[in-house]
Amino acid sequence: MSSNETPRGPVDSSRVPRYAGPATFARLPRLDEVGTADIAVVGVPFDSGVSYRPGARFGGNAIREASRLLRPYNPAQDASPFALAQVADGGDIAVNPFNINEAVETIEAAADDLLGTGARLMTLGGDHTIALPLLRSVARKHGPVALLHFDAHLDTWDTYFGAEYTHGTPFRRAVEEGILDTSALSHVGTRGPLYGKQDLTDDEKMGFGIVTSSDVYRRGADEVADQLRQRIGDRPLYISIDIDCLDPAHAPGTGTPEAGGMTSRELLEILRGLASCNLVSADVVEVAPAYDHAEITSVAASHTAYELTTIMSRQIAEARAK
């Protein structure tokens, strides 16, 4: 979108009730309706990489449905994201549910195409396997990227049942492939039992720092966000959010819930504290609506994606103004 074009925003809720019409993210136009976008919101309905409860293949559309209530002005960031940049719903990347390797290749190719148009990606999963092909594509454009990984789990294990590509292995593969800036890697919200202490040792060797959910509770969102900003600096940043970083009270609809997690308020406040970071793309994954109650999880995920979209929109507008 050029600097003199006005973005096409959401459907006017004073004319069309929020519960009516197609469930695009935040009721935004489809990508094919606007031609090109600064930010493409895309779904990846894939959960063949899960190790416990399936169902995240339905997460993207559940997030879209919950996003009907999002409004165009974000007071927490004092920004109207859909007026600052063209945000559009790019639909779903259709992948093979029976072949993980082929699915990974399909996601990577589709991400390459979208990033090639100049768009940033706001991806709705799907299980966490999808983060690897997305990171490959983003790194192809920006070089090795800083990573903030919000999750109850490390996701740096080697294999599951001999499989290299699962929702518990994407970030080990990403480190091995050299697509992450290992001086700026952090997990946030981790907790719960591990297979052994070696899990933490291996993770540290890969370059990850850890902010546990207990750290967030004790130190507060502002201090945690400040620590993360200092670690990231001005590097291109990718944020990957497994919704199970939240406590099951705030996100019951997920495949591998762990007690003692962050609140949705803490997650949103930390993200708002990262508004000055160079966010080049992001994902929200592992929403499994079959285990949800009253859309608690998908509502939290939709607001999370909204904050991430706002950060990217502000940065796009600021770059154009220079």
Image: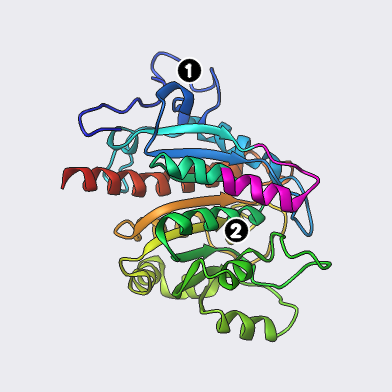
In the rendered structure, which segment of residues is drawn in magenta?
Answer: 94-109
- The residue that label 1 is drawn on is 17
Residue 243 as seen in the image, left or right of residue 26: right
**Is residue 104 at all visible to an observer of this figure?**
yes
Q: Image quadrant of residue 168?
A: bottom right
User: In the image, is residue 73 above or below residue 153?
Assistant: above
Residue 322 image offset from top left, x and y in percent:
15, 48
Label 2 and label 1: CA atoms lie apart by 38 Å
Residue 295 as seen in the image, left or right of residue 211: right
Residue 320 image offset from top left, x and y in percent:
21, 43
Residue for point 49% across, 75% down? 215
Q: Image quadrant of residue 165?
A: bottom right
Of residues 107 and 292, the one nearer the viewer is 107
Residue 281 as seen in the image, left or right of residue 99: left
Determine contact: label 2, label 1, CB under 8 Å. Answer: no
Of residues 295 and 47, the one nearer the viewer is 47
Of residues 79 and 127, the one nearer the viewer is 127
**Is residue 253 at all visible to an observer of this figure?**
no
Looking at the rendered structure, which numbered label has been put on residue 132? 2
Residue 209 image offset from top left, x and y in percent:
49, 78
- Amino acid type shown at disc 1: Pro
Residue for point 53% across, 74% down? 214
Which is nearer the N-term, disc 2 or disc 1? 1
Q: Residue 234 colored magenta?
A: no
- Amino acid type shown at disc 2: Leu
Q: Residues within 10 Å of mark 1 (few under 14, many from 20)?
A: few
Quadrant of image for the N terminus: top left
User: In the image, is residue 256 above or below residue 20?
Assistant: below
Colour logic? rainbow
Q: Image quadrant of residue 228?
A: bottom left
Looking at the rendered structure, which numbered label has been put on residue 38? none
